[in-house]
Image (cartoon, grey):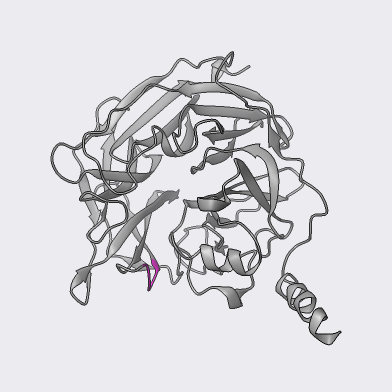
Amino acid sequence: MRKSLKPILVGALLYCCCDNLFAQTPAIRNNYQTEAGVPRLKIERSMIYSPDKEWLYNHHPSIIHFKDRFIAIWSNGLIDEDSPGQRVVYATSTDFAHWSKLEVLASPPKFKDTLNVLTAAGLYQYKGILVAYYGEYTKHRQNTRLWAKTSTDGIHWSSPIDMHVPLIPNHGPEATNGGRLIISGNFMFPYTDDPKGISGWKLSSFYPDSLYTQDNSSAFYAPAAKLGLPPLCEGSFFETDNRVLHMLLRVTGKGWKGRLWLTESKYNGQSWSRPVETAFSDNDSKFHFGRLPDKRFYYVGIPDTLHHYDRNPLVLSLSKNGEAFDKNYIIADELYHLKKEGLWKGGQYGYPHTIIYKGYMYVIISRQKEAIETLRFSLDQLN
């Protein structure tokens, strides 16, 4: 009898740190099925970077408007995804249409005889200071660290600053209504009350801290398996007016069933609920949630489930209440043709990140993990 109770007791201990436990499927959902009949937005496009014969892997983009210019940051590798030697680069533009040449933000050091891997991890600004984040790990995805560099002009950068967080973020810091900054990782969501986003980061997760030591592109499999969950990764959150944080999560690998999962925090990111499956469709890709100036919530991603991993079309979905994302628009579905094959290269509209600036939404994406493009459209098109 005592033996049969042991798994139950262990399970109870594992989840005691969670905000709450869901007894049913959460209300967050979408209604996207196919592209047919969905209205199309009038967009403008600008290709930021398309490689020629070298540095053929480009992914993990983010964009920001800082002072008088747009700044885009992304991961830049030789051929294959997340391979030794991968660095972090950026480009700038004063008009959206014309972009500077690629500039190197950070190059990886060596660990023993092999170069480490760097991953772009987003941008953040506070009172005239721009912060660029990037993660680092060794060839075998160990010794994960998060770094930052600061700038007052988006051109000249400080020396690296150690964030003391063992994380490769999915999105850079985003502020809650109370001003706390939260980084969306795979299963770690560090937070700080330092408005500059440089110090005081504290770890938080829906997993007990006994199950992990770092969070990167391979570390999310083991803790999920131990708790009987699918591989959960690459979160993005939004906050409703009741101060609840809703962190949606991608499911990948053999666990993919075409749905996002959800974990929530009622305590400003200090603890998170046990994740549950939602009725929000997903193609197996990164996505970005946010809020429009008119207070509607939005999602930009790939909700199609008929063509797994094609990452097409790119869709905007809107919600009045943060539950039913039932107004859809096609942002883009034009094809990009790959120039050079590489490990895991693919996906027409990869890893979108968004900003709202002067009546427009800007969406930056990777094109088959080879080129970096940004799109924009006027918000007055949204009914």
Give the residue at x 56% y 61%.
Answer: 187
Examine the image and state in which quarter residue 142 appears: bottom left
Residue 336: percent from left, percent from top: 31, 27
Closer to us: 295 or 14: 14
Tell me: 156 left or right of 318: left
Q: Quadrant of the C terminus?
A: top right
Closer to us: 338 or 104: 338
Give the residue at x 45% y 64%.
Answer: 167
Q: Is residue 143 magenta?
A: yes
Task: Say above or below: 137 vs 367.
Answer: below
Task: Say above or below: 239 vs 327.
Answer: below
Residue 267: percent from left, percent from top: 72, 60
Residue 366: percent from left, percent from top: 35, 38
Q: Quadrant of the N terminus?
A: bottom right
Number of callouts in the render?
A: 0
Instruction: Let me know if residue 275 appears in the view.
Output: yes
Q: Which residues are magenta?
A: 141-145
Give the residue at x 34% y 37%.
Answer: 368
Tell me: 46 left or right of 281: left
Instruction: Let me know if residue 131 appears in the view.
Output: no
Task: Say above or below: 21 vs 307.
Answer: below
Magenta stretch, main secondary structure class: loop
Closer to us: 169 or 186: 186
Q: Is residue 155 magenta?
A: no
Closer to us: 42 or 361: 42
